[in-house]
Image: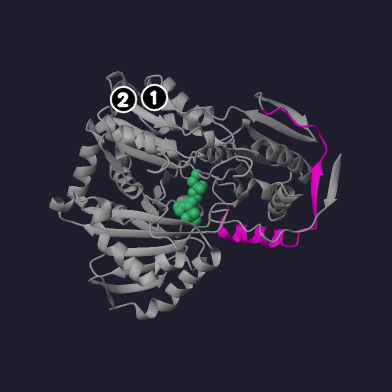
Amino acid sequence: MTRTVATKPYDDQKPGTSGLRKKVPVFQQENYVENFIQSVFDSLDGFQGQTLVIGGDGRYFNREVIQIALRMAAANGFGKVMVGQGGILSTPAASNIIRKYQAFGGLVLSASHNPGGPHEDFGIKYNASNGGPAPEKLTDRIYARTKVIDSYRIAEFADVNIDKVGTFEAGGMTIEVIDPVADYAALMESLFDFAAIRAMFAGGFTMAFDAMHAVTGPYAVEILEKRLGAAKGTVRNFVPLPDFGGHHPDPNLVHAKDLYDLMMSGKAPDFGAASDGDGDRNLIIGRGIFVTPSDSLAMLAANAHYAPGYAEGLKGIARSMPTSGAADRVAQKLGIGMYETPTGWKFFGNLLDAGMATICGEESAGTGSDHVREKDGLWAVLLWLNILAARKEPVKAIVEKHWAEFGRNYYSRHDYEGVETERANALISGLRAQLTSLPAKSFVGLTVENADDFSYLDPVDHSTSSNQGIRVLFEGGSRVVFRLSGTGTSGATLRVYIERYEPDAAKHGIETQEALADLIAAAEEIAGIKAATGMDVPTVIT
Ligand code: VG1
Ligand code: CO
């Protein structure tokens, strides 16, 4: 039995950088989930009889939304849903399943690195048949639909058991509960030299991987401990919990501080890594050295040929605009294309589909390649392991040699969280109003060369995305970028991205905040951050 249920639109269902993210109580409002899912389906054409993939990061409310989505998929005419056992699919694993089984698309249920629980965050994102997040023209359509929706369709059947692998029928649709890990592990095995990595572990190489009680636990245990022979206990916090044990599953130096402290201590293993709530981010720390995500992208690109999956070289590299220019220098050396996109993985999809880029990355701890259409935390970890196994050098040596060859891009991001939305918007419009007058002016001894509001022309579909971040470029190649987060769920988060290029190897050992001190002071002078946010220091520094 299928019912059509009358509903009223909500006005706040605009997808952000990565889908719709709100507090759980917002999602629990009457028909809120149903409205959004129906708006997604109403914005798609031709899915009758086709397959939909559903999975999430296991956070609070995941199971309830999966049951609703299953009933709605049946009522709307999907022929089949593939759902991860226990409702679990990491974001990159979901992307892989969509591609491998030629599904029409998928619903990825996650709020990524944000905390989970009854009063914390939840999210719903639609991914298209290429396995990637819906492009802007589709998210715009979905949003337009949410504003006028007046009914949704839902089938009536009892909750299905998603904890047991198997196939059955419900509401005239096939439901296949799949092992969330197997296909993903096989994909990793096809890209990397597992024998070499296994030999490295067998030779005494040690590692700590922090799954942060989030989705990568089962993936990391299977791949690192079972298939690659890393010692039992290598993977920490490996049981996914609905509230991530009360922590932010955000692999940065603030929320993965235990791992960081371990890696800087006398007891540090050879390699440390972590991933986020939905498994698409990565943190890489060598013994005694943190690798910034921007540097990691550059170093992975420069060394990717050591992995069998990339032995033939890269077609191009893409990075988001706020990500440092370290990867650009690698692209230049390799003689391949370099693309600079707005923030968010959805902008990489076209470049990957068109075969223009092989590796992509963002400063926010996201790296990935054309193997799926999402960033992929464990992929980055495995590529590092493959490189370490091939080069037989510690992380620190690889990083320092890279800097010596290409120069070092000192880089940091300062976040000001929980800013009043109006004040944050005023800061950005204040910057916009200054754009034309900034060039040639000096701040703290630094002269502005150019300033703009980043706009992206997609080279594949020729769509334009404007207002993607204020860039202030200084003479000598340093820069400061200002933008507001599109993933937060309360107030606004101001992100200030600071970068300075240092070619001189004798000056590569400076502490990052110190190396950037004059730029940080210039950013304050230009934007008046303290006055606008009422904060003297950032809430998070990465
Ligand atoms: C942030 C990051 C961005 C990333 C996005 C989703 O967006 O800056 O680089 O793609 O999160 O990542 P924003 O708009 O808050 O700056 V995840 O791991 O939340 O899917
Ligand atoms: Co994530």
Could you give the CA–CA distance between mark 2 and mark 1, rounded to whole angstroms? 8 Å
Front-most of residues 473 and 310 = 473
Q: Which SS class for mark 2?
A: loop
In percent of width and height, residue 539 lies at: 42, 53
Q: Which SS class for mark 1?
A: loop
Q: Magenta part of the protein: which range?
A: 134-162
Where's the N terminus, which quadrant? top right
In percent of width and height, residue 85 lies at: 62, 29
Task: Choose top left, top right, bottom left or bottom right for residue 240.
Answer: top right
Task: Determine which of the numbered discs, if any, sits on residue 234 in the image.
Answer: 1
Q: Are marks 2 and 1 in contact (CB under 8 Å)?
A: yes
Q: Amino acid at mark 1?
A: Thr
Q: Amino acid at mark 2?
A: Thr
Q: Which residue is mark 2?
A: 206
In this picture, is 352 found above or below 310? below
In percent of width and height, residue 305 lies at: 30, 39
